[in-house]
Amino acid sequence: ARCQANTFDGEHCRYGALTDTIRTLLKNYNVLTARTTRRNTYDEFLRKLFEQGLYSDVTFVVDERTFPLHRCVLAARSSFFREALESRWHNKRYINLTKAKFNAESFEAIIRYLYTNCCEIALEYIDSVKALAKSCRLPHLIDLIERKKHEIDEWQASKTARSNIYRLVLEPEE
């Protein structure tokens, strides 16, 4: 292993030089990120609403996948959804998007972002998610995707990049 700061080889080299006592301490050390320390009841409530579908009042179907959702969350987070739920989807509890020009994975990424401000996007779906975000009038999400994709492209072009990246992870900015 080469001890270089920008490689995982350097990390292995450092850990190899540790005593058993220090190595055990490091393995048992739990790290909290800024995101987890700031996790609050409201964020957890919205995440659970999305993941469990509790108390949903509208269900979307994309590629035969169902998404039990909440009108109030969709309307509060997206002017597109607000207008659609007040007009063409007003009395509908079941909305089938079979002729949609996007897939279920892209729809899920958008909806997860609306609920949690976080999402993961497979690189193969980035263009689809961006197009859907544009339709849903989410310019901040488009900007976030483009900036994160640019970071990945720069990292992969650098000499230190040795692995492939398959997913883009978006989290709220600090």
Image (spheres, rainbow, N blue to C red):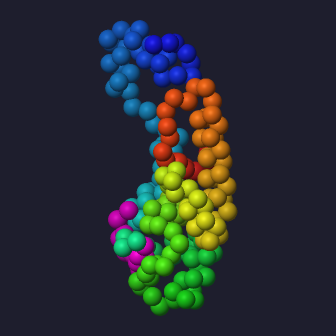
Q: Nearer the viewer, residue 50 or 103?
A: 103
Q: Say whether residue 115 is visible.
A: no
Foreground pick, 112 / 57: 112
Span of residues in magenta: 51-62
Residue at the outermost bottom position: 91
Residue 89 vertical position relative to residue 73 in the rendered view, above or below: below
Q: Report which quarter residue 140 is drawn in.
A: bottom right
| Residue 149 point in image, percent of width and height | 61, 47
Quarter of the figure with residue 57: bottom left
111 within the magenta span: no
Residue 53 in the image, given as x and y percentages of width and height: 37, 69
Determine if residue 156 is in view. Answer: yes
Q: Is residue 52 magenta?
A: yes
Pick whichever, 122 or 5, lies toward us: 122
Q: Position of residue 137 (x, y in %)?
A: 65, 70
> Would residue 140 be found to the left or right of residue 71 on screen?
right
Residue 25 versus residue 111 in the image, above or below: above
Q: Nearer the viewer, residue 96 or 40?
A: 96
| Residue plotted at (38% across, 62% down) | 51
Residue at horizontal 52 percent and vertical 60 percent from the top = 113
**Image quadrant occupied by the N terminus:** top left
What count of labels does the image hold? 0
Q: Residue at x 56, y 61 (%)?
A: 129
Q: Residue at x 50, y 63 (%)?
A: 106
Q: In the rendered view of the protein, which quadrant contains the C terminus?
A: top right
